[in-house]
């Protein structure tokens, strides 16, 4: 009936306040009908309160990712879901830095955020989540999710279009049934392809579903310098400067790992 | 019912039910939350090595579980798809003794990601080229996992036979050169500290020439030949009387997997020869809960171990 909805969705801010500003500017230019942040405001980058202030001032609603849940509730770790000891070591450094520097008011705000959000547009049921519809910290990698699994996931959670983040690498698949699964990537950490930009998605729902995976440049060198001043791990700074992951690599499947340098 | 002060018992129309003893769930009942992983024991118990610790007691000429045919595997894959299976694992025995493994992988990669668990000793150049071609021809990941034991050649060969480490390492290096980025699965002897063992194993693999080692450490299970080599589970090594409030089904792999062999459907890839491990002929028979009675369930629970890649 001519109904159209344009939805912008980004996730994994990871305290990258410069990427967040750049993405919000890009979204303003795209002028979607609705914008959502799919969670994980902190971690990895510097000065977490800057990102919290920018996001809250923008009025963009946010889901409670695993990181926001752990920071908001003063948990002992990020519950990111890593299994490798080196990955967990670096995740813990980030987490303790972020937990110490996040203001109480922001923590309280995070506690109350929803874990998922649903909307209906052009007759399609859209589900916004952080990791996957069934688990906040599930890694939905493109190469390890069969069509059969994604169809089941959509059916079991009554969704025609699922948007998620958490892995940091964007992808989109239209399933044989016509359902769509979209991982919007992350804006705070590059997508392990040697490019330094932030990644997010704009989804247009009308008679069809069109997905644009956008990349937005920002002053990543300025962020790298700020991370150095904050004495964050050199491995993190290298990732921001080069676009290649240096940590939290061990749960990458072969196909995604092969695309990276480390 | 009371009538004029006299208690009148209602007329019994059915006999008293037989007295039912109060249920005493001694072992946790594990639900299958979802079939994420289908384990396919494609080579049965046939293997080119006779490792002294083999969890499934495999070796040359051992066909307690026979090879699964290409058609048999395909039929199991088709059975799993309506259940929403996420990924497939191929094991044995040694999968590369199967004459049609590459064709089976090609069939299965059309439906989902595949992982092959191998001892790494049968990886000819032609097979590695074929694996590379298969990995490039699919949207899904093809993972090759090579098993090592302990963090030194001597430890490995003690369990697997002289020269086995050198051959496995040669396979690993050639897989990496072909861009297949193998995962190295290392069993950790119980006496080693997990973190220190992990570091030692990585150092060993780098020193051996792997530039991007991917490592998965698994504990020893006291089943199969390992039971004869060392010992079996003791009575206290079980999940008997685990308090319900501390039981988290998601901690165990069997909440998300089933295994198939030529002998039927099993709860997990470890318990294919163990009492109670077989759950039926069809995957549909095996979606019911599983009672965690086995000592191996205790190992999975205490270590948080999963046979899966992550």
Image (cartoon, rainbow, N blue to C red):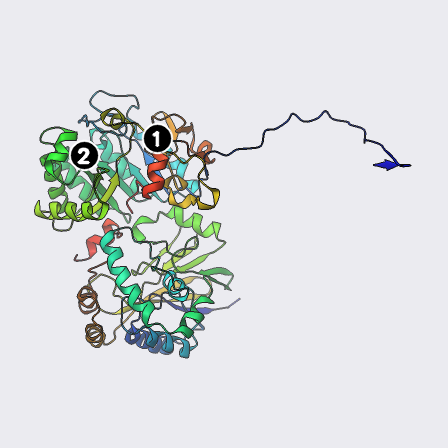
Instruction: Give the camera-side residue of A47 and B72.
Output: A47
Chain ID at mark 2: B
**Chain letter of the residue beneath label 1 in the structure image:** B
**Which label's residue is closer to the chain start, 2 or 1?**
2
Q: Distance between the residues labelled 2 and 1?
A: 20 Å
| Left or right of B55 in this view: B209 | left
Q: Where is residue A235 in the image (x, y as percent from the top left)?
A: 18, 64
Judge by depth and name the residue closer to the eye, B281 or A71.
A71
Visible residue check, residue A201: yes
Residue B189 image offset from top left, x and y in percent: 21, 37
**Which numbered mark, 2 or 1, is in the foreground of this view?**
1
Q: x%, y% of residue B95?
A: 23, 32
Residue A109 occupies quadrant: bottom left
Q: Name the residue under label 1.
A: B271
Residue A14 visible here: no
The vertical placement of A164 against B152, above or below, is below
Q: For residue A74, what is the image quadrant?
A: bottom left
Query: Dividing the image into 4 quarters, which one contains the C terminus of chain A?
Result: bottom left
Q: Do the residues labelled 2 and 1 touch (CB within 8 Å)?
A: no
Mark 2 burial class by Cα count in 10 Å: few <14, some 14-19, many 20+: many
Does dot 2 land on a helix, a strand or a loop?
loop
Q: Residue at x 40, y 38 (%)?
A: B80
Q: How many marks?
A: 2
Q: Position of residue A252 (x, y in %)?
A: 26, 53
- Callout 1: helix, strand or loop? loop
* Circle 1 Cα neighbour tier, 10 Å, few/some/many (<14 / 14–19 / ≥20): many
Q: Is residue B208 left or right of residue A120?
A: left
Looking at the rendered structure, which numbered label has been put on residue B119? 2
């Amino acid at each position: 009936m001519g109904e159209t909805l344009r939805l912008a969705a980004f996730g994994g801010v990871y305290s990258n306040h410069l990427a967040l500003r750049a993405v919000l500017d890009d979204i303003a230019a795209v002028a979607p009908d609705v914008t959502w942040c799919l969670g994980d405001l902190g971690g990895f980058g510097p000065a977490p309160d800057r990102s919290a202030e920018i996001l809250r001032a923008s009025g963009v609603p946010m889901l409670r990712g695993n990181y926001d849940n752990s920071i908001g509730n003063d948990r002992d770790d990020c519950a990111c879901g890593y299994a490798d000891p080196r990955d967990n070591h670096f995740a813990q450094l980030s987490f303790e830095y972020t937990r110490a520097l996040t203001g109480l008011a922001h923590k309280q705000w995070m506690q109350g955020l929803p874990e998922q959000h649903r909307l209906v547009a052009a007759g399609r049921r859209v589900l916004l989540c952080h990791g996957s519809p069934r688990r906040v910290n599930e890694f939905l990698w493109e190469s390890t999710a069969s069509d059969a699994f994604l169809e089941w996931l959509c059916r079991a959670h009554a969704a025609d279009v699922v948007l998620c983040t958490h892995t940091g690498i964007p992808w989109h698949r239209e399933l044989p049934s016509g359902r769509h699964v979209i991982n919007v990537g992350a804006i705070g950490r590059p997508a392990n392809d040697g490019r330094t930009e932030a990644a997010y998605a704009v989804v247009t729902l009308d008679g069809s579903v069109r997905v644009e995976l956008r990349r937005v440049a920002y002053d990543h060198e300025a962020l790298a310098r700020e991370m150095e001043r904050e004495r964050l791990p050199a491995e993190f700074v290298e990732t921001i400067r080069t676009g290649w992951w240096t940590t939290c690599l061990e749960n990458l499947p072969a196909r995604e790992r092969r695309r990276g340098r480390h | 019912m009371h009538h004029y002060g006299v208690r009148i018992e209602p007329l019994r129309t059915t006999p008293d039910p037989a007295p039912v003893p109060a249920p005493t769930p001694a072992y946790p009942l594990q639900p299958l939350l979802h079939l994420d992983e289908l384990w396919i024991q494609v080579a049965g118990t046939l293997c080119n090595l006779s490792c002294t610790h083999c969890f499934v007691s495999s070796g040359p000429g051992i066909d307690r579980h026979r090879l699964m045919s290409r058609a048999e595997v395909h039929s199991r894959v088709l059975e799993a798809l309506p259940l929403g299976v996420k990924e497939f694992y191929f094991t044995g025995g040694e999968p590369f003794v199967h004459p049609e493994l590459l064709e089976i992988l090609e069939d299965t990669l059309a439906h989902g990601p595949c992982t092959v668990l191998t001892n790494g000793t049968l990886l000819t150049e032609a097979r590695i080229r074929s694996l590379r071609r298969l990995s490039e021809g699919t949207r899904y990941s093809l993972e090759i996992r090579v098993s090592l034991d302990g963090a030194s050649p001597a430890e490995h060969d003690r369990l697997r036979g002289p020269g086995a480490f050198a051959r496995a390492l040669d396979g690993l290096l050639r897989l990496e050169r072909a861009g297949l980025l193998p995962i190295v699965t290392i069993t950790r002897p119980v006496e080693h500290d997990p973190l220190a063992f992990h570091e030692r194993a990585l150092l060993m693999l780098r020193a051996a020439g792997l530039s991007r080692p991917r490592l998965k450490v698994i504990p020893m299970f006291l089943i199969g030949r390992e039971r004869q080599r060392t010992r079996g589970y003791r009575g206290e090594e079980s999940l008997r009387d685990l308090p319900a409030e501390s039981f988290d089904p998601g901690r165990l792999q069997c909440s998300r997997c089933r295994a198939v062999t030529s002998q039927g459907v099993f709860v997990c890839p470890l318990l294919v020869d163990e009492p109670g491990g077989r759950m039926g002929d069809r995957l549909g028979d095996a979606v019911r809960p599983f009672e965690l009675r086995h000592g191996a369930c205790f190992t999975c629970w205490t270590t948080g171990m999963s046979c899966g890649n992550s």
